[in-house]
Image (cartoon, rainbow, N blue to C red):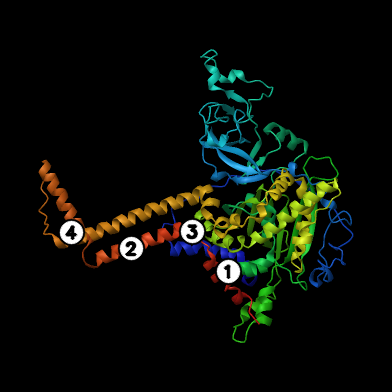
Amino acid sequence: NNPSIEDKTMKFFYFATFLPLITLPCNALITSRPLQVTTLRYSLITFTRESPHRFNPIDPLHMSSAVEIDSPAVTNRSDDSSNSSFDSFDYTAHWYPVCWARDVPLNQPIRVTLFDVDYVLAKTNKPTGDSKEDVFYAMLDSCPHKKVSLSEGRITDCGTPDNKYFQCSYHGWAFDGKDGKCVEIPQTLIAKNPNSSGDKRRTNKRKREDATAVAVTQVQGMIWIQPFLTPLEALAATEEGKIFPPHRIPEIDLPGYQTIMAVRDFPIDWTVLMENIMDPDHGFFAHSSSSAAYGFDLYAADGKENTMKIEEKVMKAPKSKEDLGKGWTITSSVNAVEKLKKYNREVRASHNTKTDNKKLEQLDVPAKKSTTTFVAPSLIHMGRSQDGSTTRSFVTGFWICPVGAGRSRFMSAGISKAPFSVPRWILHVSLNNFLDQDTFLLCGQHKAVLQKEAEGYLDMESSGDEHSYVNNVRKSTYVYRSPSERLGMRIGQFFDATLYRAPNRKETMLARLKNKIYHEPSEMTRQNVLDRYEQHTKICPDSKGTVKNCESIMKFSKAFGLSLVSMKMMLRTSRLSYNTISTDLSVSAIKQACSSITIRLGEYLTYGKRFYFLLTMSFFLHYAANKLRKEFFFKRNEEVHRNDVKFISKKWCDL
């Protein structure tokens, strides 16, 4: 708990939280809602390995003194083969996060996408005593009639409190929310008995007019979908241990922890986004203008005293009887001390750079451990603790939804011991600025990796044996040199070994390669990649509400300012006077009284310094609301980026 090694990420979180409270008004526009959690468990099976090396030392592309010569990562794997832990990994045996429960509007269907397939999601609630419980439904976003999107329809008042109906807005077909069975076709009711109910058409046998329902659940405030099973099949598969329950972050379930959630869509492949999140080396440079840059340094390795240790575990579902599971997790741990920052201060800093002696003394205190855990295929969480295994006081969680090839949904949460929770929009303002700093940089990596992967699938088809073919995309594309890249190399091996088994991945990649989509520069412009309104504001009710409130404040302040000026000019150029307000209730007397009150109010508001003060406050209110509103639209143009790049020399001195 010594402040010298306090997590810089946590400091940045609190700094970004309270700064807008001072600089921006209207901080109470949106209130926070409580987080709902449920309880599920899973077990782990640990395997060991013999060889510590990741790559063949004679491979010139991957030879590095930092990676190969220094003490290797401590890794647990079953044999010498680098891909053996991935052989049984099954993408269809997992639940996938698609959105925060609080972001789903009540009784209004929305569209979510997973592995390039669209699903319709809806939330209703049912009475449970004195409160109401949320109920969620999900199905394929396609009406069986003419394949129209069900997300363009509505939720009807028919059905039971815990089972409402989806209705297509094209021809009015209605479907049961739980199992997708067609419960009403309006056009057929006329030919039948007018008094007959649509529910009488239901049978246990699936018909062509039935929609496809999928399993959905809420865990730790997140909505998870199992798109490969129906609700009943998912329940049975979980009981039999054939699929994993949604993965959890332990601290969210503990009392005293506050969780602030964020969401944003990116036109960046979900695998590239995950690699970026688990890359501690980039923060010192890509986020140089942010105080959080030093926080990344606590998760990096230096190849000397502070080496990175890696632990892998092959997971199986709780009740599974198989020897090998269908899941995989990897955890890196390193001493939470300054590496690049210390080197820059002691070696590279110029003679006029002041050394913080206080910080140097505090580095002698035993360091905490920084841990990063990836629970394949979609959850990442990182934090610091005294021994790397105890409860962390601050945790950053990332839930990455694999929207499709070349697309991703980024969902994150700051989980901390705090006495109160702040409005989400405050975090969103800071986080969007933070994400903009390196997202556009990922475009080059995104294009290179996806094109190489698609070309590998062409070779795989030519070879005729996809099981023995190894698509070493990242090994042949990247140049690994940093000791912190031990984790990144293993993550890359995981994706290269398993992505061809991901649903729709290979087919979509081949189709995009044939259309040369990765060579189209118009799709990856700075404005398209960093469009906050399309990627965040439209899908976040809290941010959308903040924008709406800002626009209302701007209209009010503008109208108030114009009214003040108009009153001032009118009172100066006219000889209006007011009489004593009479008690007469006649129409003329009432008009005269209203006129007198208006004149008195105008003279009061426009008197002396009061007029200039109110006019200044009106201008400031309009300015502040407009500035806050702009935070939810495209902001980071090339000029802003160039100014940010200049901060690198302040973090890493030029020699």
Q: Is residue 33 visible?
A: no
Name the mark on residue 570: 4
What residue did someone put label 3 on?
631
**Mark 4 element type:** helix
Amino acid type, label 2: Met
Closer to the camera: disc 1 or disc 4?
A: 4
Measure the alpha-carbon separation of dots 3 and 1. Answer: 19 Å
Residue 649 location (% of width, % of height): 60, 76
Residue at 49% over, 56% down: 633
Q: Label 2, on which residue? A: 617
- Give the secondary structure at mark 2: helix
Residue type marked 3: Glu
Given the image, on which type of amino acid does mark 4 rest?
Met
| Structural distance between the alpha carbons of marks 3 and 4 | 38 Å
Q: How many neighbours does mark 4 have within 10 angstroms: few (below 14), some (14-19), or many (20 or more)? A: some
Relative vertical location of residue 638 with respect to residue 516 in this rendering, above or below? below
Closer to the chain start, of discs 2 and 3, is 2
Label 3: state its secondary structure.
Answer: loop
Which residue is farthest front? 515
Residue position for label 1 = 291
Quadrant location, the N terminus: bottom right
Going by the image, does 390 lie left or right of 569?
A: right
| Figure disc tally | 4
